[in-house]
Amino acid sequence: MIKLILLILVSICFANENSPFSSVQRQAYVEKVIKAFREANPNVLKQINEFVDQKERQKCRSFFEALTLNCLQLEVKNKCKDETCTILSDIALVNKVNERLFVSREETYKISQKSENYAEAYAKALSTKYANLTTELVLMSKENCSDGDYKCQARKIDTYCQKNSDKKNLPWQACVSAVITFMDMKR
Amino acid sequence: MKPVGTKSIFLLLFLALSTMAGFQFQKLDIDKIQNLSYEAWFTISFFTVVVGTWFYAFFRLGSKSKSHIRFLGPSQKYPSDVPLVEIGKLAIYSGQSTNPTELPAFAMRVLSLTLAFSLGILGFDSRTVNFMMDTPRKIANVNQYCPDEITVSKQKPPQPKQGCELVKRAYELGLVKDLGTCVDKEIDKKMDLCTLRQRDEPALHFLARQLSSVYSKNKFNVSDSNFHSRMSAAFRRQLGFFNALSGKLRNVVNSAPKASHHIFTDLKSPDGRSMHRNCLSKYQKLSHIFSVGDDDPKANSRILEHIYGQMLFNPQYDEMAGLCQEYDIHWNSPPDSCDQLVRNPMGFLSEYGAISDVTLVLNRIEEERELMRLRVQLKSIETGQPPPLPPTASVIMANLLRPRAYPTATTVVSFQCLMSSAGAASDKPRMVYFSLMGKQFQAREIKFKLERPADSLHADMYRSFAKTMVDDFHYATARSHWNVNENSFSHSDYPLTQLEYLKGMDIFASNDWIQTRSDLLEVYPYYHHLYYFVELFREQYRMQRTRL
């Protein structure tokens, strides 16, 4: 009887950790993503980003965000055959649907008015926003992670993004994707 | 009784009077003091130091008074003293003396500074200080002359529009007849008539011109033969509405409330006060998620206060629903507050300190009506035409159907009862009706379920609050196209993309299963849904409640 009660208590304690989006699982996935980004061929990454970008502008263009998301997910699923591609496209996809949260419509309009090369200026503006977020993460975090310590970096990113999602009106996944993308850009 | 120095007596008397005046004119309200601008604070401080020190030095408050005041009982007599006031057997005498009882010099200095501060608070506020700061500019404008030459500002030549080069070339070749949106805008060379003083204009002429411009702004034509009779008729008419005119002026000067909305709840006050008015800065930056400790005895009160601020006043969302000074939560109210309101509205509202604001606002409505009538009559005198007929039914209906409520007694004054319930929450509000100052009012009562403090979303409480404040509140989410359910989060691949679907999972639209998924709640985009909920609530609220 005592063993049964202990079993129930232990299973309750660990139930949360095993749920797919628990803190432990999230950090494990973020760790996997950082590793995939470090090991990925830059050309492959570029191809995935261009693919998502192109599909979003053409086939998956919709007034409804849900439809765009659904369509993009189907497209990248059809394209990706290995796990690395799946992970990288997961980030590319989240970045794409959340671009508007980083560069508002007003800013986009100003960029289109002022710049000769719109695509380049837009990418620069987006990168600046990602940089601001990453800088804040580095400044606010008390933990110092070494370059190869992906576990520590994943914990740091997850904690920061979870704490600040309410303050910045930025979904957790958008924050994680932006930070990881910027970290990879600066590599 | 020992004689007391006149300096001490009068200093204390002035201080008491100025403090009373401060409270009477609501200048010493903590809210008003907290919201004084930096400039006002500087002026008041400067005034306090300069006037307080001068007062102390000028009246030589550090030395003893040469005369004294003596308070005497029935059997006491001092032949050398002169009676000042005699009330029954008590009297106040004044006389000359060399050594009366006096406050210490340090206390006199502090009191004179306090008196100066009190006068400073009475005399200066953010508005008056702004006026003072603006005065030099206004005076400087008097000596401003019209410019000698009309100078057109040198603007940069317009930038060629992108994609217009070919259109312009086609226009030059005669292939198109119109440049369309590619036409260059010409520099606006519009001249305004300069009304300032001319360089060669005599001062007297300029003064006469200024005076005539004042007359020309007058509604009545000065050259008209009936000018004086019309002016006197208008003046007499205004005298007839003296109470409304002076009342309006008094209300404007006193910043009297333009609405009065009351929420009665049986929850305990979260900060120990029965009502709160210190709200201007309080609701500026509320976080979306609000967590309270499991063992906090006032957890539900804190949650309610947070929701109250979030729904009505947080400026991060849509336009605020109202001014927070015109809203009151009456904590610790009896569970049958709405019934008591029906039985004895005057008595109940007096008991909870709400009657003064309610009366003031209802009187202001009457004043506004009176002033509306006055405006119509003055217009009639001005034009010589008979006053217009009352508005037609269609105009009244158009006013009632507009997206904002029309100010009437029931839209600017409201009563709600939000009571806790150990059992299930009531879905539909209970309406009670009563009459107050000749107006019919309704109060809405909702019973809400006490929240689990550990739950940081408080969706049920938000819904209950919305139903209490808005008649027939309905929340319809426009996210049916998301088509999301629990299975949307069960795939092993693309976890971050799966989380995007939380944007379509609105807890305010009864997706209660998500409350059981603590892992999803950790990354739930709460602000995203709260934003729509608050926006929709305020939209509906503005159609039912307003301010004058």
Image: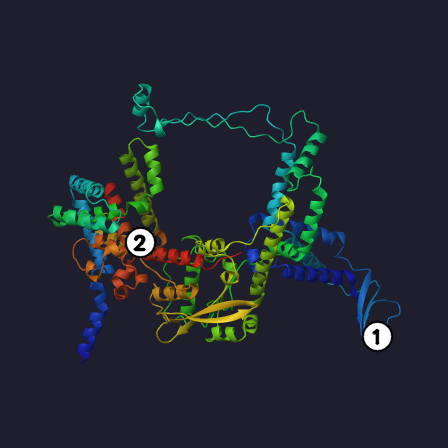
- Quadrant location of the N terminus of chain B? bottom right
Specify whether residue B65 is in view. Answer: yes
Q: Which of B361 and B202 is in front in this view?
A: B361
Instruction: Give neighbour class at mark 1: few <14, some 14-19, many 20+ (Cα, 10 Å).
Output: few
Q: Report the residue marked by disc 1.
A: B76
Residue B100, relative to residue A160: is it above or below?
below
Estimate the x, y position of residue B305 in percent, counting from the top left.
44, 64
For the point 20% across and 70% down, the residue is A11
| Helix, strand or loop for disc 1 | loop
Q: Which of B358 and B135 is in front in this view?
A: B358
Disc assigned to residue A160: 2
Estimate the x, y position of residue B438 in percent, counting from the top left.
57, 68
> In which chain is the residue bearing label 1?
B
Specify whether residue A145 is in view. Answer: no
Residue at the extreme top of the image, as rendered: B173
Side of A100 where B106 appears, left or right: right
Residue at the extreme left of the image, as rendered: A81
Side of A62 where B177 appears, left or right: right
